[in-house]
Amino acid sequence: MRYFIRFVVGVFFAAPLTAQAPSYDLIISGGTVIDGSGSPGFRADVGIVGGRIVAVSRSPLARSSARRTIDATGLIVAPGFIDLHAHLDPILVMPDAQSHVRQGVTLALGGPDGGGPFPFGAYLDSVGARRLGMNVAFLAGHNTIRERVMGTENRAPTRAELERMKRMVALSMAEGAFGLSTGLRYIPGFYSTIDEVVALSDVAADSGGIYTSHLREEGLGLIQGVAEALEIGRRSRIPVILTHHKAIGRLMWGKSVLTLAMVDSARRAGTDVMMDQYPYTASSTSLNVLVPPWALAGGTAQLRQRLANPVLKDSITKEVTEYLLNDRGGGDLKRVQFSRVRWDSTLNGKTLFDLVTRQGLEPTIANAAPVVLEAVLKGGASMIFHVIDEGDVRRIMAHPQTMIASDGRLNRIGDAVPHPRAYGTFPRVLGKYVRDEHVLTLENAVQKMTGMPAARLGLKDHGCLRVACIADVTIFDAATVRDVGTFEDPHHYPEGIPYVIVNGTPVMDAGTFTDNRPGVVLRRPSGKLRTAKR
């Protein structure tokens, strides 16, 4: 009887509280909710108060209880997309991040490829002082840290130098870094040994961070590059992301069959490894990747001195020729496209074929190699390399451990000729690879853009669409969403994403990019230190 009285009293006092309609800041009504977990979509209304989701109701919420209602009938209501590989360098001058937000991105992770900021905390403070169009987070960068300690010297660090680098990683982690990124194909990261990277990854792992790796090679050395990243993950017991995973050059096309098998094998053995990918058959990086890394040690001045030595010049030129034939060059000068050339903007959008013929030379690989070196000495360029096979793109995308990420740089309309991934990565997956080609289901694609990357970052209240989640929401039309930009004409925003809501505030509103700037800088959640290594 005493239990019954307590139960009745509890119901009596609880009833008025549940009967009262909450006051919502925003209701998203009538849409199909795909919540980021991979579960089937369902029709529901979503209620938002402040920056949180407070209701996901299969029964209609009273519109009168909200300050504003968005009618999402016929649209998909999903968590905001999370870009795990974004080049956010221009964030201080492009804080609106329009090229990302219009894709449906509400959180982007910067500092990839070893290029994270330092001093870390001061940089995050400066970014946080801007009015941001989306949320941002950052990784500590191995290349940045190594260059501050050792310059671009091609050697192993002394014990003192390694200890200094470890302290810099630890400080960055304490100031909010989500992990450590490496760019082992770039200078000076290329000069590091696996032991150096493991030592620094240990520090990131001790603070609960992740490790993202631009592999040492993605062309002829792809298999060895994957093996190295997996070994770093095994030895440091750190979660690994093989970032922008791909197979470069004709000789490597199809090798994703092997690299994905390596990922599966490593996971079965206990290494926590995942991948991210952009949905294009071209990469974009510096012209310098066509030059052997050993020749770049010490910078442009040292390269110029080496080229003045006939023996070294011959060796360097032969290696450039090899890269043009079997790596980023793809054996065809028309596959090598200029994206941003500061010393000659008329080259933007042109190809290496165009530059060689402009100089009155026959457009052969042999003639192109010296032209490449001359261009590097002038200051280099940002390039687009059309050297990825569509079959590998589809195979990697379909793998259960692959997430979607742009590798895109923040861009403004009309600025140079960037890779179209800067504007179209996420809508391209939803349009081309979900709706048109059925490589992924819609639920799986959304999960790869939301729930999976959030989990990799340890963000339990992002990448989800349920009660108590952060109100980062992307609303799109599954029937019309698509990327518009091309490699020849990249400066077009995507279609079919009318609403992007960041921390409860619409930034894209009925197809209009607003002046709202609700984004914040996220710092890594504090957690328990890793247990002692086995």
Image (spheres, rainbow, N blue to C red):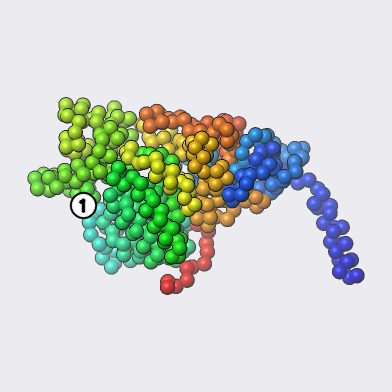
Report whether residue 146 is seen: yes
Name the residue at 75% across, 37% down. 63
Classify the position of the N terminus by image quarter.
Answer: bottom right
Question: Image point 55% across, 46% down: which residue?
Answer: 444
Q: Report the residue that reaches farthest toward the right.
A: 1
Image position of 482 with respect to 117: above or below: above
Q: In terms of secondary structure, where does tag 1 sit?
A: helix
Q: Inspect the image, locate mark 1, and give the three-letter code of the amino acid beneath it.
A: Trp
* Relative image position of residue 377 (x, y in whole percent): 20, 40
Q: Residue at x 36, y 31 (%)?
A: 416
Residue 380: percent from left, percent from top: 26, 39
Provide the residue designation for mark 1: 294
In the displayed structure image, the side of residue 4 where residue 460 appears, left or right: left
Q: Report which quarter residue 58 is drawn in.
A: top right
Residue 297 in percent (x, y) is at 21, 51
- With 76 as the anchor, is 81 left or right in this view? left
Image quarter where the C terminus lies is bottom left
Q: Quadrant of residue 512?
A: top right
